[in-house]
Amino acid sequence: MADIDLHSICANLIQIAKLGGKIVVSAKPDSSTISNKKNTADIVTQTDSTVEKFIFDHLTTQYPTFAFIGEETYKAGVPLTPQPTFIVDPIDGTSNFVHSFPAVCISIGLVIDKQPAVGVVYNPFRDELWYAIKGNGAFTQQGFNAEVRRLPITTPLPLHGLGPACIGIEWGSDREGPNFELNLKVFTALARTAATGGKFVNSLRCTGSAAITICRVAAGQQDAFWECGSWAWDVAAAWCVLAEAGGVMVDGHPGVWNPPVDNRRYLAVRPAMEGQREFVEEFWEVIGEDRSTYGPPE
Ligand code: IPD
């Protein structure tokens, strides 16, 4: 893999994401172009498919030997292999997209040996870009010709546990059963006062795009993100940004410090001079013995 030019691939992915972004901002989703996948909380639009095809056509023409996994064309059971693989979410934040809530992005990751090697996340509504190449740091840029800033954008202060933390969460599309119950338990325990057995965290944020939230964690604008149920295409690109900024991605269930990209359970923690490990352990304690039904493929 030594002959793969990650810098040129990253530049290319940025260009493709920005072109895909033009399709997204010019689209006008309406009821005739929106459909449910699993239920009303898990939706897809024609624009998701159009953008994925656009990205697929570019990438498979330019990199014919690389594999491709895209949210809209994914076939259950197709495994992630060590082969260089583009993992693409054409619109992460589809619910935001249909509501014109501007937390929407195109997420393109290149994963090699199952490890994130390049990540590009682009929000076309805010012209906000995050990108990283393994071993070369992570960067952000907002606006044409604007300054490129290295991540994290703030000094990576120590983490002092859950109490002062701003934590990204998502409700997901399970609204009954063990996954919903685990969310309720964790969200409640994080929010409650210490007097009632909780962590009384500073804030819980639910912004509808896992990729953007993980980039905000990489930037130091949020302290953490937790979700069980998201997919490799929601996290692969942003994971590279997070890792290159000095953040960590661990299992969303207690115990595994180096989960695979397709783990389906994720806890991202921001760059910090100290306190990352303690933060993760305290979060895992909140989860306790309960488990979601999500996990990597067998
Ligand atoms: C979703 C978003 C959302 C997360 C879901 C994802 P989509 O991706 O990232 O924040 O909670 O798990 O599926 O459907 O908008 O591409």
Image (spheres, rainbow, N blue to C red):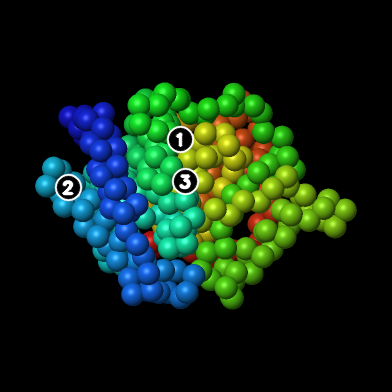
Image location (x, y in percent) of residue 217: 54, 39
Query: Which residue is painted at 40% across and 33% down in the image?
Result: 143
State the image quarter where residue 120 is shown. top left
Q: Which amino acid, by three-letter code, is at mark 1?
A: Ala
Disc 1/disc 2 C-alpha distance (Å): 27 Å
* Disc number for residue 145: none
Query: Which residue is painted at 59% across and 24% down in the image?
Result: 155
Image location (x, y in percent) of residue 288: 68, 57
For the N terminus, which image quadrant?
A: top left
Q: Which amino acid, by three-letter code, is at mark 2?
A: His
* Disc number for residue 212: 3
Q: Are marks 2 and 3 in contact (CB under 8 Å)?
A: no
For the C terminus, which image quadrant?
A: bottom left
State the image quarter where residue 184 is shown. bottom right
Q: Earlier in the sequence, mark 1 or mark 2?
A: 2
In the image, residue 96 above or below residue 113: below
The residue carrying mark 1 is 243
**Residue 250 seen in the current view:** no
Left or right: where 161 falls relative to 93: right
Query: Which residue is painted at 41% across and 46% down in the image?
Result: 125
Q: Earlier in the sequence, mark 1 or mark 3?
A: 3
- Element under label 1? helix
- Element under label 2? helix
In the image, residue 127 above or below residue 190: above
Q: Earlier in the sequence, mark 2 or mark 3?
A: 2
